[in-house]
Amino acid sequence: ASYEGNKDIVELLLDKGADVNAQGGEYGNALQAASFEHNKEVVELLLDRGADVNAQGGRFGNALYAASLRGNKDIVDLLLDKGADVNAQDSFYGNALQAASNRGKKDIVELLLDKGADVNAQGGEYGNALQAASYWGKKEIVELLLDKGANVNAHGRYGNALQAASYGGHMDIIELLSAHLSNRQ
């Protein structure tokens, strides 16, 4: 019901004693499912009824990660306001910043950084947010991360960010990262 955005059914289930933090299934819990599927009203209801904003589990690790991956800024903002850990580690991309960077969600990357996301946090498939953005050719994100102090030489699956951009075949990112490294010397 949370995944489908059916607030009335979710409310009925909660009124009948359903555990708001029950774990199971692909999405781990109702909050993560609603966050992934852009169901803000259900997210609000679940949080009002005591859902653990930092609960771990399921395919996407946590609700903030799921909302960041899917690009729903309103839900990301809501989760952060309710105490979501901006640097929580879990799942494929490592954290919410890496997921948003990988998908090129600039508004969410900015929001996460403004709320204290560690620009150089390590973990996940690409090692860090800069490598994720570099590998996928997300130039605006690469520029933003560099402006916020991302370490070009931090290591991950593809070596460093320059190697990740090379592996992804993104000449514009290679040039940007090379210029950044030249300017720092």
Image: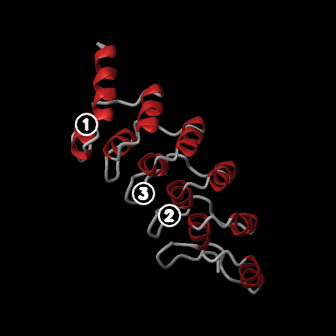
Of helix, strand and loop, which one carries label 3?
loop
> What numbered label is drawn on residue 160?
1
Q: Determine contact: label 3, label 2, CB under 8 Å.
A: yes
- The reply to whether residue 103 is visible in this rendering is yes
Q: Earlier in the sequence, mark 1 or mark 3?
A: 3
Structural crowding at the residue carrying mark 3, measured as other residues with C-alpha within 10 Å and reported as few (<14), some (14–19) or many (≥20): some
Residues at marks 2 and 1 touching, judged by CB atoms closer than 8 Å = no
- Compared to 75, does 11 lie above or below? below
Q: Position of residue 26 (x, y in %)?
A: 46, 76
Q: Give residue 128's position: percent from left, percent from top.
A: 36, 43
- State the image quarter where residue 101 is shown: top left
Q: CA distance from mark 1 to mark 3?
A: 21 Å
> Relative to 23, is 15 on the left or the right?
right
The amino acid pointed to by label 2 is: Gln
Measure how far apart labels 3 and 2 are at the Cα level.
8 Å
Q: Residues within 10 Å of mark 1 (few under 14, many from 20)?
A: many
Task: Say if 9 sits above or below 114 in the image.
Answer: below
- Disc 1 is placed on an element classified as loop
Checking the image for residue 56, the label placed there is 2
Front-lying residue, 20 or 182: 182
Instruction: Name the residue carrying label 3.
Output: 90
